[in-house]
Image (cartoon, grey):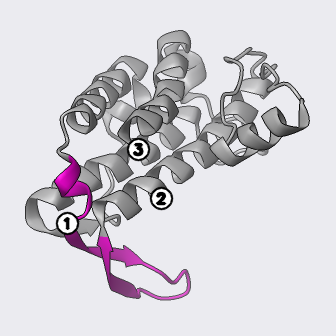
Amino acid sequence: MIEAHLEVLAQASSYLMEVGTPRYVQVLSPRFMSSAGSHMRHILDHYTALRAGLQCGEVDYTVRSRGSAIESDPVAALARLDAIEAWLTHLPDAQLREPLSLRTEVSVSRREVANVPTTLARELVFAASHAVHHFAMIGQIASQQGQVLARGFGVAPATASHLRATGAAVRQTRV
């Protein structure tokens, strides 16, 4: 599971090594409300919450680092990503099954926080899916900027399996 997870995060690494700061921070309004850097920071916030949650037994996705260097500097984001990848690489399998509590806001009309039981494995599955969703959004931003991203960037594992099964190629994203 961890190796597959690292494959997903490799998409972020590939993007961060290619993008320049001007494109990373550019907000293409009115089509988009946030920059690629904001999306990347949001992805990394989730992994940071998981790592912190493992230490205290509670994952809190409401903790965000909005406005941090990770949002405005692809090199800072890459450093955080490298730390997350190192953490995952050295994560003992037994920790994947440890019970955790998840704390997250669930309502947009009022402040309502849910606390639910979970495991690190389940939350890593969520984090990977969440990351791919945001990679697809970053891909759309990059497309508007005229960038070409790596083949398969922002393609979910189930979609890649479907494309392989049907003989369709995973396209290079002309973004």
Mark 1 secondary-structure assignment: loop
Q: Are marks 1 and 2 in contact (CB under 8 Å)?
A: no
**Residue ID for mark 1:** 98
**Residue ID for mark 2:** 126
Q: Distance from label 1 to label 3 (Cα)?
A: 15 Å
Residue type, numbered disc 3 = Met
Which residues lie in the magenta part?
93-118
Residue type, numbered disc 2 = Phe
Q: Distance from label 1 to label 2 (Cα)?
A: 16 Å
Label number found at residue 1? 3
Picture coordinates of residue 83, whole percent (x, y): 23, 29
Q: Nearer the viewer, mark 3 or mark 2?
A: 3
Image quarter of residue 69: top left
Image quarter of residue 41: top left
Q: Distance from label 3 to label 2 (Cα)?
A: 13 Å
Would residue 170 appear left or right of 46 to someone viewing this image?
right
Within 10 Å of disc 2 (Cα), the crowding (few <14, some 14-19, many 20+) is: few
In the picture, the quarter occupied by the C terminus is top right
Image quarter of residue 30: top right
In the picture, the quarter occupied by the N terminus is top left
> In the rendered image, is residue 120 in sight?
yes
Mark 3 secondary-structure assignment: loop
